[in-house]
Image (tube, rainbow, N blue to C red):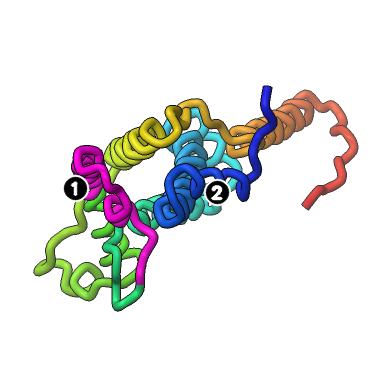
Amino acid sequence: MGKSKTAEELKQYRIKVMGNDLGLLFDSLYNEIVWIHYKWIEYHELFGVKETRIDIMNKTAPFFFFMIQKVLWEDLLLGVSKITDKERVAGRRNVTILAIPNYINDIKFKVEVENKIQEIIKESDFCRDWRNRRISHKDHGLSIDNENTIPLKPSSRLKFRNVLEKIHELVHLIEKRYFNTETGFKYLTSDRGSIHLLKFLEDGLNYNNDRLEQRKRGQPNEPKKPSLV
């Protein structure tokens, strides 16, 4: 079994196989896409799997987790907005999937990539609408004159997951062409992430419940455990 490559080694390998410009662009986009995916894993594990997890959060730190939900969701929309933005904004170049076809010489493959990119752009339109009018800017119409403005495009976990899957399809398309392999996004997991935290919170709730039951039975409480905060 070969040893895993470092981030720099992977970058140099991509440059070697794909050429300097496409290799650098793909490496930067790939790292951003993986980061978005890991954040999606945490968001989904917390807020999109089980009501019992919501119950734990509501019983321990409801306002904190409300903020986490809002901030993480908006950050996910921002992440997709960044990699699907125009190649140039206000005279500045952006690292975006729209730039990928510029460095592909094979016409047939270039058209295939462009078609996949257009699917992503269409499906992710709601991300950029939220970014432009709510997250990065405070739209006047939405904030003040909301009776006479166009509502934000609908967003949901399902819509975001569909966008992410299409982005993965683009990555797989490029990886298959240049490296004859593909990233197993569906197998990625977060180590010591949100589930790890919820298990500790659940243990804390159970501990408190046990102490309350002891009081009801007239039994002395256990010695107070030292705070870790």
Residue behind mark 2: 11
Residue type at tag 2? Lys
Up-down relation of residue 142 to residue 84 (above or below): below
The residue depicted at 69 percent of the width and 34 percent of the height is: 200
Q: Residues within 10 Å of mark 1 (few under 14, many from 20)?
A: few
Up-down relation of residue 64 to residue 141 (above or below): above
The residue depicted at 86 percent of the width and 41 percent of the height is: 224
The residue depicted at 46 percent of the width and 41 percent of the height is: 37
Taking depth in this image into account, of 102 and 223 the one nearest to the observer is 102
Numbered tag placed on residue 122 in the rendering: 1
Give the Cα separation between the discs numbered 2 and 1.
29 Å
Q: What span is colored magenta in the figure? A: 93-122
Q: Secondary structure at mark 2?
A: helix
Q: Please indicate, yes or no, whether residue 66 appears anywhere in the rendered image.
A: no
Q: Left of 3 or right of it: where is 58? A: left
Up-down relation of residue 210 to residue 106 (above or below): above
**Which quadrant does the N terminus fall into?**
top right
